[in-house]
Amino acid sequence: MKTPILVTGGTGNIGSHVVRRLRAAGKDVRILSRHPRANEPGIEHVPGDTVAGTGLAAALDGVDTVLHLAGGAKGDDIAAGHLADAARTAGTGHLILISVVGAEAMPIGYFRAKAAAEEALAGSGVRWTVLRAAQLYDFVWPVVRMLARMPLAPVPGGLCFEPVHVEEVAARLAELALGEPAGRVADLVGPEVLDVQKLLEGYWEVFGHRHPRLPIRIPGAIGRAYRNGENLAAPGAQRGQLGWTQFLAEQDAAARRGTVREQPRSA
């Protein structure tokens, strides 16, 4: 029997792509989730909750590599702590975490929780790898679509992103899972730095219905952090090849086929 790779969040937006790639590489996969599905060839689904800390010992039994992709609006730090403790007890050889670019710099709870999750891995005694990735196009897409359809589209000044395609993030995570522990690896971001106006212009170019824009300013510490580019990658980041225009073309093609696109789930 092959040693499976454990993937938390393996049925989520990123996780499902990673699992597909691991299976293509010939690896058996064990997926931990609160509501496990029926098993499939090469894929075992087991119950557990990383935030509550339940089911982890059984999920880690016989596992050497763990990809921690489960996440949410709250509790990522708690989940990573529980998983790191359980992995140390189980003698796990490699613990991999997906984090977010700017984790230690942005004054937002989600970013701070990701930074604390990184610390949990680093202090676990388990060999580890952390990949910080920019926001996916999938998460930028519904926000831009909403703004683009408003009669007067608000455009926050100084708000820039480096969104990245989910396929490129999944490919990198699968590569890391098949490799040796590497600590903090290069950030992974998209090929472009895009402000809200550029994101809107790209949307309107593909889907039409161009509307007037209303410049606005994000106040407080969060606004300052975005204007200072604290959410952007430092030099040396790995940049993907799939741009915003290509992603929009994919959405346009899906719309023409009548494909209903679900809201992306947390990683």
Image (cartoon, rainbow, N blue to C red):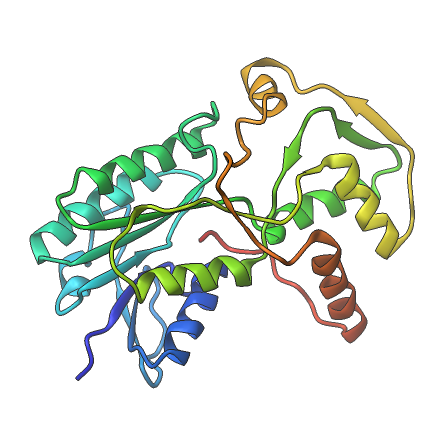
Q: Is residue 32 visible?
A: no
Q: Residue at x 61, y 54 (%)?
A: 138
Which residue is painted at 54% across and 15% down in the image?
A: 221
Question: Which of the 4 quarters of the picture holds residue 264?
Answer: bottom right
Q: Residue 48 in the image: x percent, y percent?
A: 25, 59
Q: Residue at x 26, y 68 (%)?
A: 5
Quadrant housing residue 37? bottom left
Single out the residue that lies furthest toward the front.
Answer: 236
Extreme residue toward the top, this view: 220
Q: Quadrant of the N terminus?
A: bottom left
> Residue visible at 52% across and 36% down?
233
* Count of labels in the image: 0
Choose between 204 and 154: the one closer to the eye: 204
Q: Position of residue 132 (x, y in %)?
A: 43, 44
Q: Position of residue 44 (x, y in %)?
A: 28, 76
Q: Position of residue 250 (x, y in %)?
A: 72, 65
Task: Please indicate whether residue 210 sits to the left or right of residue 87 in the image.
Answer: right
- In this rendering, the answer to whether 146 lies above or below 153 is below
Q: Taking the image as drawn, is residue 230 in sight?
A: yes
Vertical placement of residue 77 versus 31, above or below: above
Is the residue 112 above or below the residue 95 in the image? above
